[in-house]
Image (tube, rainbow, N blue to C red):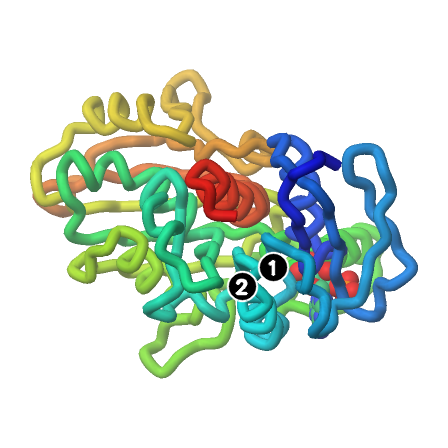
Amino acid sequence: MEQNGIKVAVVGATGAVGNLMIKVLEERAFPVGSLKLLASARSVGKTLPFRGVELPVEELVEDSFEDVQLALFSAGGSTSRKFAPVAARAGTVVIDNSNAWRMEPDVPLVVPEVNPEAALTHSGIIANPNCSTIQMVVALKPLYDAAGIRRIVVTTFQAVSGTGKRAIEELQNQVADIVNGREPSRQIYPRQIAFNCFPHIGPFLENGFSEEEMKMVNETRKIFGDSRIRVCATTVRVPVIYGHSESINIETEKPLSPEEARRLLENAPGVKVMDDPANGCYPVPLDAAGIDETLVGRIRIDPSVENGLAMWVVADNIRKGAATNAVQIAEILLKNRRF
Ligand code: A2P
């Protein structure tokens, strides 16, 4: 631990994203003065490593934040709804990975490559966007700045790690059951996920879209600060462990050639272009797993509209889509002396 470092807590430390938050703090050499690992009472007695030291997991309670400057939350919406305001009242800055606060007007929704300045106007809680939204806006930001975006049509292919640790186990167990001739069992997902896919992420709403699809619509508008962008999303769960893929079609205000889009993306922060399909070069989830860049390929003209472009965007949903984005937000606060 660093003397004079920031006093940090990770809420949901035993989960898929929380655990990675600890690793990302370590990897990016965030100046951690002390680290408190919080989870449910079920996890008391467990330890997790940070910088070579095993730290105990403590139960999350109302008093957990008294000596904490920064809390990274990834323990689900209901835990965030209950405890993020408690932490904020104790003077802790909360960076919350759940859906609980994202659309609140006084809660900034931040992707550091897109709207970093928004992080500086918080009232105690900053929201990390949905994983699918993050990688989409990282890839679209340079195109939006150059040519404006009127309309986005996106279909996602989302990995099970986005649902958490138990969903990863469900996929692995179903695969093992099926290859061994057993009937697969199901607890987490509405349908079998092994050797299957389904367009059902979150509950369906009255307008026919799923909650995940409407997150992509509303969060994209909030992050770009542009309520005129029209977005139509179809979100699909696929039997992949790490890495969301997205097929994205955009209609720009001004014409933008694929060559120009490629050049803009090659110079964009957090983006890596992998776009030489004739030689087998296009991104897939296994390329993105474990890295922080958003990978973009298959950039081509969409001939179905006047100023149309189509592309394929892949990123690690629990790194850039969750843990890394949260730590990058903390780095913005640190750089601007907000602790
Ligand atoms: P625990 O492991 O003790 O259940 P994932 O998204 O991978 O499923 O992880 C969810 C994380 O949120 C875990 O660390 C889990 O802790 C934590 N969590 C879930 N419910 C609560 C709660 N009521 N209080 C504190 N932590 C919780």
- Towards the viewer: 72 or 314: 72
Residue at the disc numbered 2: 98
- Residue that extends furthest to the bottom in the rendered view of this protein: 206
Q: What residue type is labelled 2?
A: Ser
Instruction: Please report whichever mark, 1 or 2, sits nearer to the chain's N-terminal start.
Output: 1
* Residue in view at x 69 percent, y 74 percent: 62
* Residue in view at x 68 percent, y 54 percent: 9
Task: Give me the C-alpha separation between circle 1 and circle 2.
Answer: 8 Å
Tell me residue 75's x, y (percent).
65, 64
Q: What element carries label 2?
A: loop
Residues packed near mark 1 inside 10 Å, few (<14), some (14 to 19) or many (20 plus): many
Counting the numbered discs, the total is 2
Q: Report if residue 166 is visible in the image.
A: no
Tell me residue 135's x, y (percent).
42, 44
Q: What element carries label 1?
A: strand
- Towards the viewer: 87 or 314: 87
Q: What residue type is labelled 1?
A: Phe
Q: Is residue 21 left or right of residue 244?
A: right
Quadrant of picture, ligand 1: bottom right
* Residue in view at x 20 percent, y 61 percent: 227
Report which quarter residue 336 is drawn in.
Answer: top left
Q: In this view, does 140 lie to the left or right of 104?
A: left
Q: Do the residues labelled 1 and 2 touch (CB within 8 Å)?
A: yes
Report which quarter residue 222 is drawn in.
Answer: bottom left
Circle on res. 199? none
Q: Report if residue 301 is visible in the image.
A: yes
- Residue that extends furthest to the right in the rendered view of this protein: 45
Circle on res. 73? 1
